[in-house]
Image: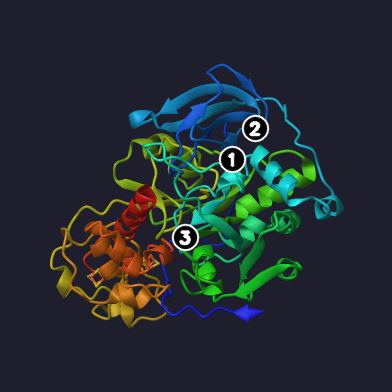
Amino acid sequence: MEKVRIKGGQRFRIAHGVGENDLGVLSSETVGFHPSGTKDFKAKVVVKVGDDVAAGDLLFFNKKNENHRYLSSCSGRVKAIEYGPRRVLEAVVIERSGEAKTSFGSFSPEQVQSLGAEATIAHLVKTGLWSRFLSHPFKRIVPVPGEPAPKDIHGHDLPVPSLIRFHVSFVESEPHLVPTGATLEGNIENALLGLEVLKRTGFDVVAGVSSNTDSKLKSVSGVAYKEVDETLFPAGSAEVQSYFTQPLGAGECVACVDLETLIDIGHVVRTGELRDERTYAVAGEGASKRGHARGPVGLPVATLQSASGVPSGEATSSTDTRLVAGGLLRGKKIDAKHYMGLTETTLNILPEDRERTPFVFFRPGGNRLTTFKLWTSALMKGKEQVATTSNNGEHRGCVQCGQCIKVCPVELMPNLVFKAALAKDIEKMEQLGIRDCTDCGLCTFVCPSKIELGEIVESGKELIVKEG
Ligand code: SF4
Ligand code: SF4
C-alpha cells in the first residue's frame, strides 16, 4: 500500500475533544432537512405544511438541476418550512410519526456486482445520494455524467468539470470531530457495499486509510489505497489525499465522499430504504459532557446541546456561546434553532471570547493554542492547549511571517494567493495554484494576524467558477 507523506500540516493537542464517551441514543420529535449551504442550490420545495410524507419521499430539489434531490429519511407530517434572508431554504421541518417508507428496491452484494454504470448512477440520483457528492476543487454537487451544462446569466453554457475519480477517507485528523471508529461501529458492511457501488459507476475509487483502519476496509479489490499519518492534520482530508494521489488537470474534478454518505449508499442498496441514523458528537470547552451519540438524520442542534449538559432553553438564548457545526478548523457557525445538515455530525460548543486579556504578551501562555515558539506552550510538548474564539486584537495586516506557507499541505503560498483573490486577479490565482487549495483552513488557523485566508481563497475560487 502506498504511503502518502504530506509536507506541511500540523499536529494538535487540543483540550475538550470528543473523547471516548458514548452519550447513548438521542431522539427528537422533530427533525429538519436543508441543503446545508450547498453552492448554487436554489431549492424548489415540493411539499407543504400539513402534508404527510414517507421516508424516501422527495422534499425539495434544485431549481437549476433536478438531479439534485433531497429526500426525507423519516416519515411524518411537514410541520414548517423555514426560509432565511432572500428566501434561502433553512429547513423543511418534519414532525416524526409512523413507519411509512418508500422502497427503492434492494440488491444483494452479488446483484451489485452485475449493475451497470448507468443504472448505478441513476439509482444514486433517484435516492438523493448523488447530491451528497461534492466536487473538489469548487465544492459543487458533482455533475451527473451526460447532464446538460449549466447556463450563465446570458444563457451560455458554462464549462462542466469532468469527474475523474471518487475519493473516500477512512481517517479523521481534524480536531474535535466524530471519531471514525464511532461512525463505523456496526456499519462496516454498509461501508464495504458502498465502496462496491462506487466502483460500479465506472469511475476509479481511491480510499485514504491509516494503520488503525479496520483491515476489512483496506482489502476491497479494485480500490486504490493510500496510507496516511492520522496524527497530522489535514492528512485525513480526502481533498489532500487526492492531491497526493494525482493533482487535478484543468477541467477535472474529484468527488469527495464522506463516511456517512458511503454508509448510506450501502444501506439503501442492501435494504432498499433510506438510512435514518447518524453518529453525532459534541465537543468544546462550553460542553459539560463530551462524546458521541447516535440519533436521527436532521437532529435539532438544541438536542445535541442538551446531550452536552447545557439545558436547551438556556443554550438557545445564550449569546456567550459559539456553536460550530463541524471540526475546529473547517466547521461553520450554526444557530441553536437550526438542524444538523445531512453531512454535519459534530457540534462544537465554544465560549465566546470577547474580552481582551490585559498584558497578554507578558503572560507565559502555558495552554495557549499557537504554532509560534513565542509562548511557553510550544515547549510543553505533552500538554493540551485550549481553543478559543479570540482574535487576539483587531484586524491586522500580513506580517510575512511565512507560517501559512509552512503548514499548507499542498505547497501553496496562501499569503500570495489571498492577495490575488482580493485583487480578483484570476490569472495570478491560477498561476499560484488556487485550484489545489483543499479548504483545510489551516492557514487561517495559524495566521497570527487572523486574516481569513481560507474564506478569501474560497471567494477567489467562486470568482473563477462565475467567470467560467
Ligand atoms: S491555502 Fe490554506 S486552506 Fe488552502 S490548502 Fe493551503 S493551508 Fe489549506
Ligand atoms: S500567516 Fe498570516 S501574517 Fe503570516 S505570512 Fe501568512 S498571511 Fe501573512
Q: Which one is in front, 184 or 18?
A: 184
Residue 266 in sight in this render: yes
Q: In the figure, residue 31 lies in which quadrant? A: top right
Q: Mark 1 vs mark 3: give the one in front.
A: 1
- Disc on res. 297: 1
Q: Mark 2 points at which residue?
A: 74
Q: Which residue is drawn at 42% across and 73% down?
A: 409
Q: Marks 1 and 2: CB-CB under 8 Å?
A: yes
x, y (%) of residue 108? 84, 49
Within-10-Å neighbours for mark 1: few <14, some 14–19, many 20+: many
Q: Which residue is drawn at 64% across and 32% down?
A: 74
Q: Is residue 219 above or below residue 312?
A: below
x, y (%) of residue 305? 46, 43
Report the number of numbered marks.
3
Q: Mark 2 vs mark 3: give the one in front.
A: 2
Task: Pick whichever of labels 1 and 3 is earlier in the sequence.
Answer: 3
Residue 29 in sight in this render: no
x, y (%) of residue 351? 32, 52
The quarter of the image holding the N terminus is: bottom right
- Disc on res. 176: 3
Q: Is mark 2 within 8 Å of ligand 1?
A: no
Q: What element carries label 1?
A: loop
